[in-house]
Image (cartoon, grey):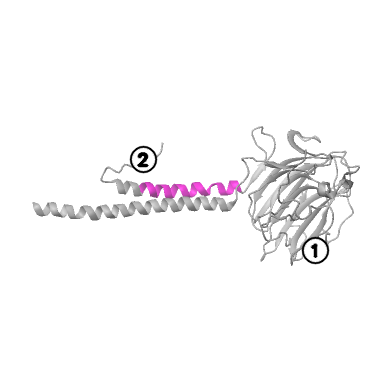
């Protein structure tokens, strides 16, 4: 029941002051509580009542939950991007995170019949929507290229997009991979950092610029995206290619302290390029490697400018009510609630002062008459 404050009794201003002060004390911590929860999110696909995040689908792709393959117990999400001349992307999209530090972890599985092709299939990407609405390459993208995993990191220097490619080892179809990305986003005056582990082994790192330092903070997309299947690329990239099918599970995003990452990552040079280190030969299991090549971005395998920030006519997104909200919104709600309660308390205090000033002379006149 709402708290009703009577204005008919002599003590009404005092009770109003107490009520408003109580609101001020209660609303503050209540509004601040979601800060921790909203900065972390997880999806294990086990509960039928848990809704999926946004789905970004171009064409006739699908993201469906079903039995996990490869001897893994429970459920997993099956991602399918068919080779139908139109489809090129089927992703889950998680927005609302700030531009600080986070740990992203997830598991993925390439089926045993995965087709090796010398074109990128992006399975996870961190994408920064720009102020001008123009398309731009993802700031970080994990992909399968040929028989191997690779990571691309992008940043901007003097208006030109720069790129470094970090090899992460053999792809190993028919094997569940457990990935962890510890990312601190760079800003115009502060370098960022990135460390990648696969199955508990550090396989790559990057330190320096890892962001465009403009537009919205990077958001997270996971699924199957083939940039070279975009309609404007023409049909030649699709010839002889099978559909892209993979599985994902146990997505977890957690806010972390700036720069927190495994102790054994290789130090890297400032300015956006990773320091060279010895790279062992490809092995069936993950092995530490950090030998990127840095260049101005212009290679095939990524979305062209204008290709990935705005939704095309064929792309549709389904909203979920479990998407985390940004910290700016939380601060605005908290500030508005506290400001409103403070104003009410101040008004009650003024009413009490006026009442006392009005009643005091009356009491004096009664005494003079006696």
Q: Earlier in the sequence, mark 2 or mark 1?
A: 2
Q: Residue 164 lies in magenta, yes or no? A: no
On residue 4, the disc is: 2
The answer to whether residue 368 is left or right of residue 294 is left
Would residue 56 be visible to someone looking at this image? no
- The residue that appears at 30% across and 46% down in the rendered structure is 12
Number of residues whose C-alpha sits closer than 10 Å to that of mark 1, classed few (under 14), some (14–19) or many (20 or more): some
Q: Which residues are magenta?
A: 18-38
**For the residues marked 2 and 1, what is the alpha-carbon distance in whole angstroms?**
67 Å
Query: Does the magenta segment cover residue 30?
Result: yes
- Of 60 and 193, nearer the camera is 60
Q: Residue furthest right?
A: 240
Q: In the shown orientation, is residue 239 left or right of residue 325?
A: right
Judging by the rendered image, the residue that carries numbered circle 1 is 275
Q: Is residue 209 above or below residue 248?
A: below
252 and 363: which is toward the camera: 363
């Amino acid at each position: 029941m709402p708290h009703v404050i009577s204005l008919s009794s002599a003590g009404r201003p005092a009770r109003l002051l107490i009520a408003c002060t109580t609101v001020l004390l209660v609303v503050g911590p209540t509004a601040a509580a979601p800060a921790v929860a909203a900065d972390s999110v997880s999806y294990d696909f086990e509960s039928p009542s848990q809704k999926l995040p946004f789905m970004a689908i171009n064409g006739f792709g699908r993201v469906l939950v079903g039995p996990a393959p490869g001897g893994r117990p429970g459920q997993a999400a099956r991602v399918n991007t068919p080779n139908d001349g139109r489809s090129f992307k089927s992703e889950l999209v998680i927005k609302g995170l700030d531009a600080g530090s986070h740990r992203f972890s997830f598991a993925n599985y390439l089926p045993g019949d995965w087709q090796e092709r010398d074109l990128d299939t992006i399975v996870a990407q961190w994408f920064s929507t720009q102020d001008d609405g123009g398309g731009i390459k993802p700031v970080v993208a994990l992909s399968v290229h040929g028989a191997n995993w690779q990571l691309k990191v992008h940043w901007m220097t003097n208006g030109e997009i720069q790129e470094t490619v970090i090899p992460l080892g053999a792809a190993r179809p028919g094997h569940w991979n457990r990935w962890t990305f510890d990312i601190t986003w760079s800003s115009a005056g502060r370098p960022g950092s990135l460390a990648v582990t696969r199955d508990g082994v550090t396989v790559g790192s990057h330190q320096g610029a890892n962001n465009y330092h403009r537009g919205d903070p990077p958001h997270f997309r996971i699924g199957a995206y083939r940039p070279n299947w975009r309609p404007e690329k023409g049909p030649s990239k699709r010839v002889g290619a099978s559909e892209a099918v993979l599985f994902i599970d146990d997505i977890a995003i957690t806010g972390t302290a700036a720069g927190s990452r495994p102790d054994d990552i290789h130090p890297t040079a400032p300015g956006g390029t990773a320091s060279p280190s010895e790279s062992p030969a490809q092995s069936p299991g993950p092995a530490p490697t950090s030998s990127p090549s840095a260049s101005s971005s212009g290679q095939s395998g990524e979305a062209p400018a204008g290709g990935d920030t705005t939704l095309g006519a064929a792309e549709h997104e389904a909203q979920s009510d479990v998407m985390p909200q940004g910290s700016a919104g939380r601060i605005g709600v908290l500030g508005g609630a506290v400001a409103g309660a403070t104003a009410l308390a101040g008004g009650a205090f003024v009413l009490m002062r006026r009442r006392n000033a009005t009643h005091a002379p009356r009491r004096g006149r009664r005494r003079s008459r006696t």
